[in-house]
Image: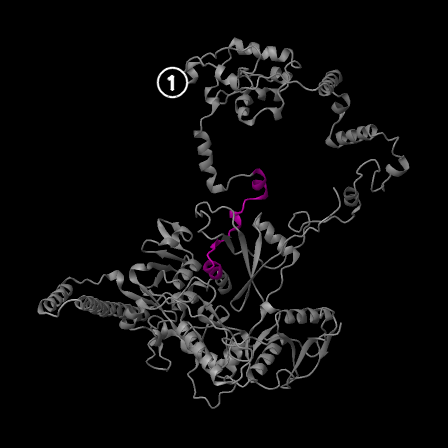
Amino acid sequence: MAEPNKTDDSDGIFSELLSPSELFAARSRTRKLPVRGQKDFYPSGSEQQKQQLQNSLDEHWDLVSEERVERLGNLVRGIWNPSDQIVELQSPAGKFWQTMGFSANGKQCLQPEEALYLMECGNLQVFHRDLPLSIQEGYETFLSSSKLSLQQYQVFGHLKRLGYVVSRFHTSSVPSLYERQLNLPPPRDRGAIQLKRKRSPSPEATATVASSPSSARDEAAYRSHPSAQQPVSESSHPPADDVTGRSWWGDRLFPPEQQQEGGPSPGGSTSRRDFLSIQFPDLGARDSPGPLAPPDPSLLPGAMAVGVCSVSSWQRRLNMRKEKPSGREQRRREEEERARRSKGPDREVQGCRSWAEYRRLMERRRKWNSGSAMRPAHLWEKDVTPLHDPRQGTSTAELLEKISVVKTSRWADKACSVQAVGEWQISFNVHQPAVNTEFRKSSPGTPYSRMCVCSFDGPVPGLGELQHLSQQSGDVPVTMAVVDHGDISFYTFKHFLLPCDLPQ
Amino acid sequence: MDASPTAELTTTPGQYVGEPPQDGGGGDSTSRPPHPLIGIHLCGSTALLWRTADVRAAREAGVVGSLVGALPRQPRQNGRLGRPLQLGREELRLLLETRRASVRLPGDDLERSAPNSEGEVQQAQVECYEEEQRRSFEVQSILALEERKSALLRAMGGAKQGYHRNHTTDRGVSGHLEVLDQSFIFPRSAVAVQLSTARAGLSHCSDERTLLSSAQPGSSLRDPRSESRFQVFRDLRQRGYYITSAGKFGGDFLVYPGDPLRFHAHFIAVCVALDEQLPLVDVLAVARLGSNVKKTVLLCSPGPRAAPVHYTSLQWSGMV
């Protein structure tokens, strides 16, 4: 075992530098940690206890005094860039590049916390002004900026040593609530996915753009007896076929009058296609339209030749079965249809000049329909109404829910807003150890958790701060890493919904 | 069942801590040979010890601290950590007040653009470092060659056991050694380099300044709470106990009867001012926690102006 060169006990600066022979000997030193024995309860002052203590201390000092010695070939060389507060690598990065570092201006770079961690692991040697930085200088140099504190680094190092993939947190990296609701891909991937969509073969490419007389006739036939051709309901229609069907289902969105009035505007811009004037063939029609005519060659690019297109293969895939609704269903539909046709445009609704008027009208109608005779006016028509209408909601749980004057609210919801004070910030994204999951820096995926570093001496975050943090984090839980003199504890605050054992 | 909340408050100052443990561990060191000042380095506002000698000296003075760096031998685990040693506020103050340590500021020349003279100093340091590396490589390649030779001799010696000792094998050995001498190349990548833990002294030692102990950080803005914490810490230390922080146990300090390497903590010290109103639920909560981890909870209240610290322990009465 290599002992540091303790040539003098004085305040020698070089006392911990190893000589070449010590360095050479250190290559074959043990990597095993000494095992700690059972502790004693009380010092008895016996010889045996003293000896045990001495042994433990000797082992401890051996371990603590050990210096890092690595083969030059195993070391990655980096240079500290004080202006950008990053470390630029000068030799190719090692395995750590899978989970750490980033590229900037064609250089491999490391954040200071990553560099310091790798220095401590004996993988990296960082130079500043042509001299290697010791671990101490690394701490004092890298952790001096306002961006990274010693406590944050201690949490970073602790998690890294446990094997987690840890990266800095940026508020912009979290998709907004709107993006999450739409399930949009993260911004970095959006371009790639769009590109993919364009490339994927779509049946639209084979659809013909034509205003041939046959398709026009189909359209007319469809309109003349719409009730006979009730569209196949959405649920019975497999979504895969939806793609082919969409082109002609789509025209149901436009009422016939609009199509006639605001049809093709002849003097309009020619650069944009007027989709109202483009007729799509009705492939689902009872009488099969036969093969589709070839498209107008002037619409096709270059030397592309498209012949007559047979649609019989597609038609086989279409669900052509006649819908057989049950008797009651049939009657209901017919009734609805009749009501709709007989009513015509609602005069009263048309008479409304604003949304407020319309809403008032609807409210009046609702009251009329709900049978105000059943609900005594002296109870229900005043400002204060009963909490419960005895005709509705009969289960106990529903009733309890209704009469609970103070509603439960999740603090993570936007609805309950408490003023956030103090400077609580999320520091790190934490991903599961890279061994188990296929972690990629380019698309890290959803983090396992996010870390907020705080101190034992500091205050406990209030409800407002917790809400603020969880909103910053989005769907990912926020963990509080509390540092107490290098000792780190992790806490999470979770919403707790008291269980309700009543039948729903 | 001791679950009944009838805790008995026994106010007996010094009952549990009256007699200091046999293994006094260096509570007072007037008889000790004077040790060079422990060098304390600040990282932000945190006090760190970097050199083994300093860490050892602090331990001998009864200051345990906590190791917070990755252990060189096995850097990717959290069970045992290595240098630096982080000092708590009380530990730092005790070391400074007993004049065993001094705070040193790093040279701030890392950020400063170097004037000419300093540039020359730096140039000299770089040359010195490179010369050192060259020498290290030469020595190590000689050592590697010797190692290879002795390995060869051992292998040949092992092979010789089965044969008669004759001249041909001896000649073979020397021939092999000669070939080895000529063909042996010690690759540059195989040279062992040290990644220094503490500041190596090569680069910035010239700028290292020593501060007077009175100029320690934050000495002017001490609140009564940290003051009482320090009073308790100093008193316990003078009684020969070893102390670490007890954040995870809901107290201020964990109190060990001997070196924490060999002994379990006996007490959880909670610092409370003498006149502080304490809700009973808090007292019961901390007592419950203490009994769960088999430690005695001590309520520690320093008296006014150098008066002794009052220790109060909590015990479940055992009555149901």
Residue at 68% from the left image edge and 47% from the top image edge: A415
Left or right of A349? Residue B252 is left
- Image: A414 above or below A35: above
Q: Is residue B218 visible?
A: no
Q: Is residue A131 left or right of residue A61?
A: left
Q: Position of residue B173 (x, y in %)?
A: 13, 67
Q: Tell me, yes or no, whether the highlighted magenta stretch contains residue A473.
A: no
Of all residues, the one furthest to the bottom in this rendering is: B31
In the picture, the quarter occupied by the N terminus of chain A is bottom left
Judge by depth and name the residue closer to the eye, A419 or A70: A70
Q: Nearer the viewer, residue A474 or A240?
A: A240
Residue A229, picture quadrant = top right
The residue drawn where x is 49% and y is 20% is A270
Q: Secondary structure at mark 1?
A: loop
Q: Which chain hosts label 1? A: A
Question: What is the total number of numbered labels drawn onto the structure image?
Answer: 1
Question: Whole-percent x and y of residue A279?
Answer: 54, 15
Please provide percent x and percent y for residue A431: 49, 52
Per the rendered image, the range of residues in magenta is A156-182
Whether residue A234 sits left or right of residue B207 in the image: it is right
Question: Which quarter shows the C terminus of chain A?
Answer: top right
Image location of residue A439, percent across then percent down: 45, 48
Q: Can you identify the residue that label 1 sits on?
A: A304
Q: Looking at the image, can residue A48 be seen? A: yes
Amino acid beneath label 1? Met
**Front in this rendered view, residue B158 or A362:** B158
Label 1 CA crowd tier, 10 Å (few <14, some 14–19, many 20+): few
Relative to A143, say whether A444 is above or below.
above
